[in-house]
Image (tube, coloured by chain):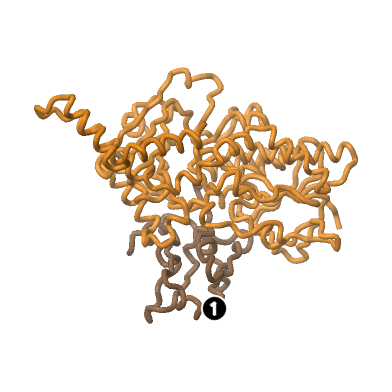
Amino acid sequence: MSKVEEKLFQNRYRVDEGRPHIQIIDQEKCTECGTQDCTYLCPAACYAKAEDGRHVVLTTDGCLECGTCRVICSEFRNVAWEYPRGGYGILFKFG
Amino acid sequence: MEKFDVIVVGAGAAGNAATYTLAKAGLNVLQIERGETSGTKNVQGAILYADALERIIPDFRDDAPLERHIVEQRIWIMEDKSHVGTHYRSDSFNEERPNRYTILRAQFDKWFSGKVRESGALVINETTVLELLKNDAGRIVGVRTDRVGGDIYADAVILADGVNSLLARKAGLREEIEARNVALAVKEVHFLPQDVLESRFNIQEEEGVVIEIAGTITRGMAGTAFLYTNRESVAIGIGCMLEDFKGSGVSPYTLLEDLKNHPSIKSLIAGGEVKEYAAHLIPEGGYKALPKLAGDGWLMVGDSAGFVNAVHREGSNLAMTSGRLAAETLIALKTAGKPATAANLQAYVEALNDSFVMKDLRKYQHVPALLEEKQFLTTYPTLLNRAAETMLRVDGVDKKTKQRSALGAFVQDRSLFGLMKDTYKLWRAFR
């Protein structure tokens, strides 16, 4: 397990199965992005470089709902970002 | 359909302060929060500033879940293996009504929400507000939620939906937040036996220590780190401006691991059990980044509006104060039988201007630009730490030579003119 996964393992979530609250709008646009900052700046490591080395894969299960991915994608505006449905997502015990 | 006097979106520090104040005054108020219970979506360091809360709930100390009151503040300028620091500790902070406390936000907010319910407000949890409702004239008249038949109407809507401020942006009331105006912070809560914690930090039961940290730990990015003592845990975290993170190749959790492994920190948290990892954006753009704060039928409070004093690491007090002032503005309008128009809500902006919220934000308006100059983030911390080591190491070199070498390093790295310019910039930013 990576360091981040170990960290997220401590957290409590109620995952909204099959209804990710964040989506990459156009997968192809990510291939034009030189830095793909989301792949290392997302504090929950939800974004990963795809096996082809060009695309980006998003898995929102560990999302901490901070908003970083949306704010940093300012050049392409390629992140559709909503809060999870009421009651779903991260449930902070201590905050 | 029932129409409310006010709808408050969000149950953080600002939303709770606003809702409580409104309901206490007898207004018909609805608060909508997406978390399972109020507090489960909220993240803070966290320090509670008693004054801001006392003005809303004077006897909060009777039953609020407070961790420790702060008797000592440490400020550390870190280099890779060292830190130079100042401590201020005083027994006068052991007073009947202490001024600052550490808290765990999820627990504190749950308590605050209980007070909000007792005050007579209707609180709905597990409900996400999707967008604001406008009438033909462009006035905000209510909210659309993710519940079936989820449109709800009110005379005014208070936007306390947090730093991402999605609702205002979707409604065209503000622009998307920019990376240069927010910091990304990550933190962990480490649990330690209470007696171990108290002996490590040299504190008695209920006393607490705050450590604020700057220096090379942020790798040249504008940012700070912190360590706060709770009753049986420490909160440890680090944050940097998102604009600086961009293109850095550095992950926020890597910085957190570096911080935890720093020799000045490692022994303080050794043996602790990590029970939570959190991340949060902090609106640190200051005065120059503030959006429009009110308009026809709406007011913005707390993090949504960007009310954070990054220099003093204050936010929750600005949030509570802005929430209270927004509520008081609406109460006064209701009493006078006036509508919540943009013109009438200017009273909220004026109340903010008269308060410490705007005064402090205005005072430090030049600081964000200052932090774009990297010498303040790495060069000076390094020079300070090296100078301390030079002066303290006893090795047969005479003190005058040591002093010359320490000062010479400053001139060499920044030049005399550079030092003078930096002094002026610091004075201008902090005067």
The quarter of the picture where the N terminus of chain B appears is bottom right
Q: Pick the residue in front: B3 or B353.
A: B353
Q: On what subunit does the disc labeled 1 rest?
A: A
Dot 1 lies on which element? Answer: loop
Asked whether residue A33 appears in the rendered view, the answer is yes
Q: Residue at x 66, y 31 (%)?
A: B57
The residue drawn where x is 60% and y is 62% is A83
Q: Residue at x 67, y 45 (%)?
A: B301
User: On screen, B230 above or below B152?
Assistant: above
Q: Amino acid at mark 1?
A: Asp
Q: Nearer the viewer, residue B414 or B360?
A: B414
Residue B402, image quadrant: top left
Q: Colour of chain B?
A: orange
Q: Which residue is mark 1?
A: A26
* B267 left or right, relative to B364: left
Q: Position of residue B408 (x, y in %)?
A: 24, 35
- Please tell me how crowded label 1 is: few (under 14), some (14-19), or many (20+) other residues with Cα within 10 Å: few
x, y percent for residue B342? 80, 48
User: Is residue A9 or residue A70 the one in the foreground?
Assistant: A70
